Image (cartoon, rainbow, N blue to C red):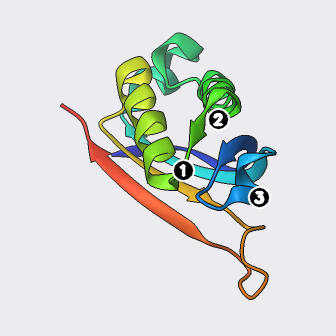
Amino acid sequence: MDLVKIQGLTVHALIGVFDFERHAKQRLILDVDMHTDLSVAAATDDVRNTIDYGKVAQRLAELANESSYFLLEALAKEMLDMIVDEFKPQKVTLTVNKPDILKEAENVAISMTRECN
């Protein structure tokens, strides 16, 4: 299975359980692995035959910007559902990094995977 990847996509979202997190959007960094068959795209050289990573990135940024969740898990689920519904990968893994939340840690992250029919 082939793979379309987006690594290090910076988005901003209102997210978190602490009071101070509810007042300003925070930086999140997304990594997305979308498994799909790229043979037709490679043969035709046509973006319509692949997962358009530019459109995926745009939609992820829009969702993050419009969101107001307490948990990374809830935002990640919405993002995964959108990718599955709109872009139809065979499998997708999304990692949501929240690097600025714990001063004692370099990063906090969650990863979620969906197998698609």
Q: Is residue 49 left or right of residue 46?
A: left
The disc placed on residue 64 is 2
Quarter of the image with the C terminus in it: top left
Residue 46 visible in the snapshot: no
Give coordinates of residue 34: x percent, y percent. 44, 41
| Cβ atoms under marks 2 and 1 closer than 8 Å | no
Which quarter of the picture shows residue 101? Answer: bottom right
Residue 117 visible in the snapshot: yes
Q: Nearer the viewer, mark 3 or mark 1?
A: 3
Residue that numbered label 3 is attached to? 20
| Crowd around label 3: few <14 · some 14–19 · many ≥20 (10 Å) | few
Q: Nearer the viewer, mark 2 or mark 3?
A: 3
The disc placed on residue 70 is 1
Q: Earlier in the sequence, mark 2 or mark 3?
A: 3
Give coordinates of residue 90: x percent, y percent. 29, 36
- At numbered mark 1, what does the secondary structure look like: helix, strand or loop? loop
Q: Earlier in the sequence, mark 3 or mark 1?
A: 3
Residue positioned most to the front: 19
